[in-house]
Structures are given as structure tokens and as C-alpha cells.
Amino acid sequence: MRIEKLKFATVEEIYQNYLPLVKPITDTLEIFVEQSVNFVLAQDLISEEDLPGFKKSIVDGYAVNSHDTKGASMNNPALLEFAFEVKIGEEVVQKLKPAQAAWVPTGGMVPEGADAVVMVEHTQRFGNLVEIMKSVAPGENLLKANEDVKKGQVVLRKGTRIQPKYLNILYSLGIEKLLVYRKPKVAIVSTGDEIVEPFVKVKKVTQVRDSNSYALVCWLKNQFGFEAKRVAHVRDDEAELTKVLNQCLNEYDAVVISGGSSIGVRDITAKVIEKLGKPGVVYHGAMIQPGKPTIFGFVDEKPILGLPGNPVSFTVSAYVFLIPVLRKMEGEEEYLPKPCGKVKVKKNIPSVQGREQFIRVKLTFEEGELMAEPLFSESASITNLVQADGFVRIPRGVEGVYAGEYVEFYKL
Amino acid sequence: MRIEKLKFATVEEIYQNYLPLVKPITDTLEIFVEQSVNFVLAQDLISEEDLPGFKKSIVDGYAVNSHDTKGASMNNPALLEFAFEVKIGEEVVQKLKPAQAAWVPTGGMVPEGADAVVMVEHTQRFGNLVEIMKSVAPGENLLKANEDVKKGQVVLRKGTRIQPKYLNILYSLGIEKLLVYRKPKVAIVSTGDEIVEPFVKVKKVTQVRDSNSYALVCWLKNQFGFEAKRVAHVRDDEAELTKVLNQCLNEYDAVVISGGSSIGVRDITAKVIEKLGKPGVVYHGAMIQPGKPTIFGFVDEKPILGLPGNPVSFTVSAYVFLIPVLRKMEGEEEYLPKPCGKVKVKKNIPSVQGREQFIRVKLTFEEGELMAEPLFSESASITNLVQADGFVRIPRGVEGVYAGEYVEFYKL
């Protein structure tokens, strides 16, 4: 059988060979900026104006000709004539003449003729005279009219996922609507004869409440705004699984199967994917720990992933593989997981031959230093997910990590 | 006047003297787990059962008495009698006798009489016989019935903000509803004579579109689920500001004023807060850069904060001060900003006397190493917020940081 011949793939191979096959959604929609957080831009956003749009003071003080302040100091102040006061929001038409100074508030317009602003702390006003006690260089304490944004400049690139910190510039430029990509619709199917619905009374101690599919829906919705739905639970039955997956492939952009970690069940999932369409299963297993029994397929260009049933493996596999697939699908430019800094590991981490490891760690502060405590409990322990702040990644072929070494941290 | 006498406060002073005065909301509500992400738990969550609830195999293989495998190896396998097969989800009543082995799938129940599981890779089946080619220790490859969670154990503490990664354990334990705190209602008021609504045609080049108040609403809603509303824009007028803030204090739990960075305008805001009620302004300015002109007040126990109008200062001040206030108010146990690892700075960062600095940095990968490039452009540049991935924090009294040093990174 073909599946048997397929090799396991490394994380890099999956990133290099599987992810590029994921077709981005091309449908777009126009949305209001206030609804745009977590959508991905479908076009470069080009500014239609300069920002700030006028020569803007960034301090409270006196607008001056900088050469009038040459050599000015506490002991040897420059004496300038008070010309006028600029009010906030006011368009100044008066020009500043040499040897004059004009009061400008923070955010106020610097009048023509002035090329710098002296902070109020370094000035003293006596009636019609202003003492300048510090020299300023041309351009000091002001923003030029196009210093922040130039008309025609790309302020946000196509493929950028909108974050709250980007909204300031959008509102500042008066941008009301954005063209974004449609969100991928993700179907989640749980499998396994032992699985029961989470809120029913468990009849046998060996029954396991479905947590993966429901938790994944919340995760995908909350962190990325994906349209995720838990479609069904299916028993370990080829015909039933085929029927449900076929429906999902008709109605959704991507399909996730929460599996089935035992050999027999994984084989059913792989067999069904193979029969559903071409190319079927692309990789059957990843060189990663936890998360090894992940299945990577496509049916008629739609990604279909089988994730391991153990909740920790499921979460790691979703983090490392599924989420990049969906981010790529949504048209996001940077879709791979990124570390957010280095942390010092508290204990030795032994390596596992041939497999890249995603070790769950708990961050603690010790003597002002951020430390990562590896959680070595079985990956079958769900409490692992409660204790862990994220992962450290130990590449294949690395001889483990010693206590005290710094490694890159991935926030969960 | 009293305000004049109030000192600037350091970040530490604000954390030690102002934040503890913030009264947590005590109203609670019951919500469904699927709606719970970003709510804060109002009670310890105690498990009513053991997890996994039965002796569970974590591999595919043969359940055995470990002492029957003593000394077993490839060259000297132990020969056991095949007893029966355990099916996934099945409650096994048969007991395993000495010198027997039972097939167990991953997640299946380990029968009584067995104390370990041998992975299928280290076994071979010949009809009624099972060859065991590796010895196992007691407890190997299985989870005890209460190894993951013990009945009566606190699985999540009161004061925890629910994250998607916590949902697996909630669903696994069959928890359907949670008692959480009500979300704080936050009023946001923008001030400034230069400020205009974002989507109107600007009449003068010196008019500035309101970005802070609208962007903050999206930020607070999206990242924390706070009930934030941009209530009004108010011109720099004492009477008008008093009226609007009074209304806000009646209807909301906390009030934010997007200010007004010039001295005159800040004074109006502080004066109005002083008149609204006791204790009024607690701190008038923070020893931080950017974000110095932040006003910290309380009116009848409700926090009222004046944030600087410059968008970068506004964002830093919201990150460092406002968000901790609101998180504390919602009953969250850990409410201060936390770094998420160390990054190597690419350029020297000079220190600023007496002020703690939050330097915006852009993260890049160079030769496989995460580097932080300080963005030295004026904090008045809004593009700063687009380029920055977050901040590095340079404490007061530190003589700057040299290129190549590692500093803690705070993700924005």
C-alpha cells in the first residue's frame, strides 16, 4: 500500500514541501477599520497624504531660527524678540523673522521662518523678550511635514495581519475601510470509539470527553479569528468517516481530524484521506516530539490534517503545523511560528534521537532573571497545558541542552 | 495649588502605591466554557474527579507484569502467553495473570494484574505467544488513574485569565460553566482643540485625526475583552470636560482621557480631576520615556487616567499603566507586564537620566539569532508603532545598553 511507503517528514521538510502547496484564499472583502483586527490585508496600504502634514513641534517651547541660538547657554543666553503665540490646531500664517521667537505648544505648528524649537525649560520670558539658554540645531524638537509618513508610501504591506498597534496609523490617515482576505472556514472532526461529548454523563471510566475539537475551535477563533466549527464526532469506522469528511470538504476550506493515536485508528484516517481524492496523504508522521502521529494531506487542493488525539501532542501539532497552514491559507506573509526571546533553562534537557522537540516550559522569575523550567511530565498529562507558558524548541541533531543555557522561547 | 506640589512618580512607585488602590470588581457571572476565553476566574476551579480515571496506556503495545520482562532483550526475549486484546474505550474486567501479555492500544485501559506496557516495536507475536524484547520498569508507558489530575485538586486558580490552552482540561473534566468576574467598563474621552473625528474631511493641515481613543477601544476589546467605549471628544474646556467626565464616572468603572500633551492642556485635565472628587490626582507625571505626561487619579475609588496625546507615548503609557489597572480591576492575579524572553540589541542604547525607558524595537533574525533593532525615530512618529514588535525596558540608573547585550523583550 502506498501509505506504508511514505516516509516520516522532518519539520523543515513539512515547511518546505507541504506548506508551499497550501493555496491562499483569493476572495476578499471590505471591512471597517474598527472590525479589522486579525484580518489579513489583501492589498498594500498606501498613504494618500503626508504625516504630520505640517511642521510640528514635539515639545512646549519657542520656535526659533536655529542660527539665532548659536552659542546660547545659561551664562550667555541669546535674547530674542517675542513675536506671537501659536495655538494648538491653528494654521499659522505669520512668518517668523530673524531674531524672533514664537510660543508653540506640543503638537502645534512651527511657523515659516523657524527651523527648530527650544524647550520651555531652557527659556525665560520677560515681557516682549525671550531668553534662550540652550542652542538648538536645525530640525531639533520638530517633525517635518512628511517625516512620519510620505504621501505614496506603503504603510502596511499586503499579507499583514492587522494588530491593534497598527490602528493608530490607520485612523491617523483617515482610512475607514480595508480590503482583506476572507477567513478560512475550518471543519474539525473528532474521532475515536472512546470519545464522548464533554457534557454528558460518562458511562464507563474508560470513556474520554472530547476536549481537543472544542478547545481548538475556541483557540482558532480567539487568537486568529478563523471561522472554525466542530462538525461532528465520528466513531472509528471507515464508511462513516468517509461520509463526514466528504461533507466537510464540500463546505469548508480545510479539515482537521482530531485523532486517533493508536496505529489502527491512524491507519483508518490515512486510508480514508487516500480514497477521498488526490494527492491524498502527503506525509504520514512528523519527526517531532510530541506530535509525531500527524497526517498531512490534500484533497483537491484543500488541506486535510490528522492531529494526534493526546491533548498535548494535539496542541503542539496544531501550533507547529495546523496554524501555519491556516495562516498561509489566509494570505499572511509570515506564517511560521516565531520565538519571542531567549530564556535560561533551569534543568538539563536530554535530546531524543532524530526528532525535533517542543519541550513545554513554565517561566519563572528568579533573582530578576527569566527562567524556563522544563515540564517533563508525560505528554499525555493535560495539566501540562495549564502549567506551560510555551515551548522551547530543541532541533534535531542537538545533543540536548544544559541547565543555564539560553534557548529560544515560543509563547503558547 | 496642590497639583503643583505633587511629585512625579517612578514606575515602581506607581506599581507599589497606585495600583494597590485599584479596587477589583466583585460582581460575578456564570458563563459557558466556550465563551470563557479572556474572562478572569472568580473561584478556584476544583476537579471533581481523577484524570485519566483509569490506568491508561500511552503507547500501542502489550500490557505485562514488569517482573516478567526482567532481563528481556533482542537476543534473549521473554516469552509470554497472549491473554486477550483490550479495545479502545473498553472497560476491561479480565485480569492479567503472571507470564501473560494483553494487547492495549494507545489510550486503552491497562488490565488489573499488569503494571507496565511494552511498546509494540519491542515485541513480536507468534500465534498465542508474545516475544518481549525489552524489559520495562513498573509504571512504564502508562498513566496511573490520578496521575494527571487528582479529585479535589485545584486545576485553575481564582484570578486566572482564561487562555485557550486551559480549555482542554476544562472540557476533559466535563466542566460546562465557570464563575468569572464581570468585565470592567472603560470610558475613553479624547481631548484637544486640534483633534477631529477620523473620517471627516480635514479642514486645516494642523488638524489631527483622533486615533488614540478609537485604537485603544479596539486594543482593549481584542486583547482583553474589556468593555471599552469611546464616549466623546471634548475641546480644551474645563466646564465641558467636567460635564463629560462626570457622566463617565456615573456609567463606567474606569475613565481614560486621551490628552493633551502640552502643559496648558494637561493642567486643565488635572484641575478637572481634582474637582471631580477625592482623592483626585494621585500622581502627575511618571519617570518614564515615552509616557511622562501621564496623570493618575481616583474619583470615589474609580481610576481615572490621563494619557499623553502623542500616539507612541499614549501606547506605552497604556501598556505600562492603564492595562495593569484594568487587569487588577478585573481580579486578575498577575496583572503587570511580563517580558517573554531576552533579545540581543543591535545598537547601543544611551540612557536617559532619571527615567525608565521603553525603547521600541523591531525583531529580526540574523544568522539564526533573534536581534532587536532599537527604533530611535522620534516617539512622535506613529510609524514607530507599525515597525515595532515590542519594547526593551531600560531601568532608571542603568548606564545604557551596548550593542550585543541581551535585554528583556516585552511584546506589544
Image (cartoon, coloured by chain):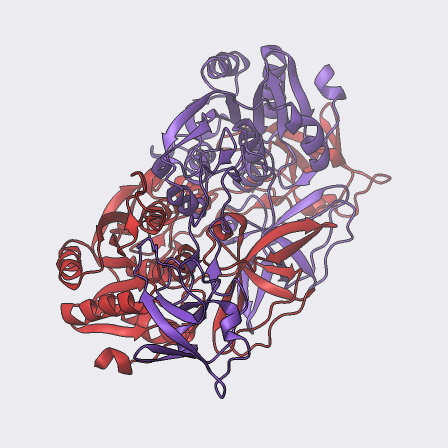
Chain colours: A purple, B red
Horizontal side of A139 relative to B326 (left or right) equals: right
Tell me where residue A399 appears, x and y as whole percent: 78, 53
Residue situated furthest bottom in the rendering: A75
Give B197 or B274, whichever is nearer the viewer. Answer: B197
Q: How many marks?
A: 0
Tell me where residue A181 appears, x and y as whole percent: 47, 27
Horizontal side of A347 relative to B332 (left or right) equals: right
Residue situated furthest right in the rendering: B75
Residue B328, located in which quarter of the rendered image? bottom left
In percent of the image, x 51 and y 65: which residue is there? A140
Residue B17, located in which quarter of the rendered image? bottom left
Q: In which quarter of the image is the N terminus of chain B?
A: bottom left
Tell me where residue B133 appears, x and y as whole percent: 78, 38
* Residue A140 seen in this snapshot: yes
Horizontal side of B253 relative to A336 (left or right) equals: left
* Residue A308 seen in this snapshot: no
Q: In this view, does A45 lie above or below B189?
A: above
In percent of the image, x 66 and y 61: which residue is there? B344
Q: In this view, does B290 lie above or below A4?
A: below
Q: Is residue A33 above or below residue B279?
A: above
Q: In this view, does A189 lie above or below B258?
A: above
Tell me where residue B105 appears, x and y as whole percent: 60, 31
Horizontal side of A287 relative to B324 (left or right) equals: right
